[in-house]
Amino acid sequence: MKTMLLLSVLSLTVRLFAAENPKVCRPVVLKCEHIVNPIGIDIQNPRLTWQLDDDRRGAKQQGYQIFVGTDSASVASNQGTRWDTGKQSGEDMIIAYKGKTLKPNTPYFWKVNIWDKDGKVRSSAIARFETGMMGNDTWKAAWISDHNDVAHREAPYFRKEFEIKKTLKYARAYIAAGGLYELSLNGGKVGDHQLDPMYTRYDRRTLYVTHDISSELKIGKNAVGVILGNGWYNHQPLAVWDFHNAPWRARPTFCLEIHLIYTDGSKEIICSERDWKTSSGPIIYNNIYTGEHYDARREQIGWDKPGFDDKKWHGVRYRSAPSTNIVAQQTVPIRLVKTYKPKSVIKFDDKTWLFDMGQNMSGITKIKLSGKSGTTVRIAHGERLGKDGRLDLSNIDVYYRGDKQAEPFQTDILILSGKKQDEFMPKFNYKGFRYVEVTSSEAIALQDTSITAYFMHSDVAPTGDIKTSSALVNKLWRVTNNAYLSNLMGYPTDCPQREKNGWTGDGHLAIETALYNFDGITVYEKWLADHRDEQQPNGVLPDIIPTGGWGYGTANGLDWTSTIAIIPWQVYLFYGDSRLLNDCYENIRRYVDYVDMISPDGLTTFGRGDWVPVKSSSNLELTSSVYFYTDARILSAAAKLFGKESDYKKYSALTTKIKDAINAKFLNRESGIYATGTQTELSVPIYWDVVPEDMRAKVAANLNKKVAENNFHLDVGVLGAKALLNALCETGHTETAYKVATQDKYPSWGWWVVNGATTLLENWDLNAERDISDNHMMFGEIGGWFFKSVGGILPDPDYPGFKHIMLRPIFPEELHEATVKHKSPFGEIVSSWKKKGQHIEYRVTVPPNSRATFYPPKNTDQSGPAELLAGKHILKFRIVEK
Ligand code: BGC
């Protein structure tokens, strides 16, 4: 929330790359609700966004006109029968639809004409969005399931045949489920999503998914099949987080509509109904924490194809809908994103094999093998090996309360058919693992081709890139991203193995790293809707979201559940889109009001504290109160943004009150020390801007000294790890910050990497005995910090979404070059520099319709900022001793 300075352009050598063949300007990357050509949009005011493809210097948009209609040809000829904005002047590129009421299940076409920097009109290509069910009342199908109860172990299979007699124009499937589903048509899986629908507070919000099934259907007989899995809906074995007692728990159920739109203009709907048939099949057990048990002898070949004999199948029954709020899953799906082949295979004996996939990840494995009928094959997944070289699950199965023999943790069980090569990949589960151990009841023969691993996560598009002359920096960035992706399954999780919980703190501690590196807005919009579903009327939020009821202890306070304010605010900064902040405004207010009520003097101990520290613990009241201050500050900024004058006054006064209370109690103005002066206690107030201006340099000098005395090692838990590097860097102690970031002796991020970590860990100490998952994201600020420091790419709160880019790169002594890129809403920002002796050549790309200010660091021969228009620039200057 720093105010942008009025800048004077100083005498930097600024040159523009002669754009050899400047592209003709064109609006591109048209998205609706931040998705390209989405189907199943559920709201009346979807956001339409675009970018400019224009590499001319100073490229920008002077105005725009949007056309929306149901006929692509008329939209192409500038007719917006549903909406025509008329010519609007300005540079806005996020516009919410305000045309005629959108109808359900309808394709809409749209385009945008823009006026470029020279006032020329430039047209986009035609884009589309298609509405979904748009409310509960439009559904015609029924919620169905089999006749079993929550304890039943076998997954239910469902089928129905139907005939298509006319030529199809297109077809859609809309499917909602309590639990997980896999939909198939004529023997083939529909789509490439995994674990649909995503986990929500099912009894408050149930998601449905829209599939384009036009090419899966044919004239004549067709068959549709559905398999249901338990997922988070029907949690069978005991778990310490009480999921087995979740208020929504029931036998999985689904509701499906297949819409057939014919070329003659008519429409037909195939519904889930009483005329479907159900049976059990080869999936004899499935659980989100343990695995899937699959008996290949029970496969029913052709069950989801037309002509299958289903006489032995049973009738279905109606079930109640999980909730009365069935809404579109409007977010990027979970997919099998990357494939890994084993790096090594060790055969211990004929029945015991160990595969090293070379990368810790979230996901699943596929196994192919043949053997005697009835052979039981256990495929166990874990992160560590014991001294004997065998798989060791002891760091991750600690909270599992199920039967470790019959339902082993992170283990699929396959019973071979004996008839063919069996191929198995679970449908309703994922694990966190690097190693796969296969054991069997009979001798089997495996090769390195027998196992394939799939890294699976919400398939967010990458938006960040870092390449530097430091191999450690490059590795830390990759390792951080692998931890981030491993912990993204429609909501951010703490770890993909032990818990799979949406721990709030872990989510917001990683948010900047997340948004620098991935286009995650739709995932966070979904997760914050989960927050709104979970919030108590008094404003309190649980530790983990979603939750089956667990998480209202005493520690679910500010340092964790401030997700409700911090995430919408960061999404606003990175995207310039205030929709999420607006959607959460009342929830933030309610949250802040609650804390205000229990903290009359402006201080609070509501929180968990600096979790998993190296050695020093920090004052809980200090850190929790700083997060209270942050939330109040975000709330007052949001109030101002949305023109809520009296809220703005009220909450900016509260912000000042909290700040004053923190400083009165914890800051020793004499010494410049907060509390006892741990790294966390000094860096948290600096980073979150609590320190009075006149004390900032002194407190920062103390922090710098403290870190130097510790031989440039960190001594922090998660709250300090978020603040430390930023606090040092923002106060000019950039060399210290870089040394801590690239430290490779214990304790440090680098220590993990030199010891072979391929994802971030949960504990600084490699020999710790608890909190020892090897794939955690709560220390993940490091990955984002490289964008802020060596790249120096920062959003400006006054011009969010990188409308104005603040460039504050640092040039650490030990680093020779760095190229840092971020794909912002306006296009790619590049901040790239190279040293030649004392000389630095700095290349910058500012995307069209945006502008940047370069703030040279103090150790250069430039003392003031330089304004950069859209386009490419080369700046040259020298490093000097100061
Ligand atoms: C989780 C953490 C979480 C913490 C809070 C742990 O078990 O794995 O990441 O934030 O609990 O206490």
Image: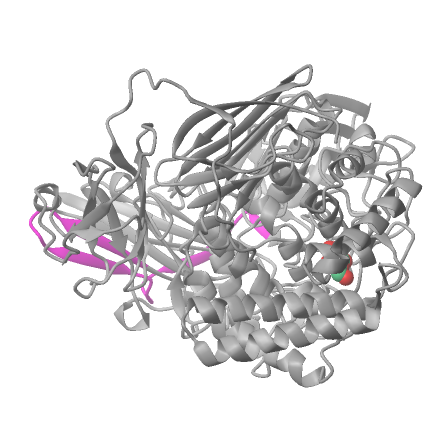
Please tell me which residue lies in front, 418 or 797: 797
Please tell me which residue lies in front, 424 or 58: 58
Q: How is the image coloured?
A: one colour
Judged from the image, the quadrant occupied by ligand 1 is bottom right
Q: Position of residue 816 (x, y in %)?
A: 68, 20
Quadrant of residue 746 within the rendered picture = top right
Where is 271 relative to 194, above or below? Answer: below
Based on the picture, tell me whether residue 270 belongs to the magenta stretch: yes
Based on the picture, tell me whether residue 334 belongs to the magenta stretch: no
For the point 76% across and 48% down, the residue is 724
Where is 805 relative to 718, above or below? Answer: above
Where are the magenta residues, as a range? Answer: 257-284
Where is 427 relative to 750, above or below? Answer: below
Q: Position of residue 175 (x, y in %)?
A: 37, 57
Quadrant of residue 54 within the rendered picture = top left
Task: Say which quadrant the C terminus sits in.
Answer: top right
- Is residue 474 rendered to the left or right of residue 645? right
Q: Main secondary structure of the magenta part?
A: strand
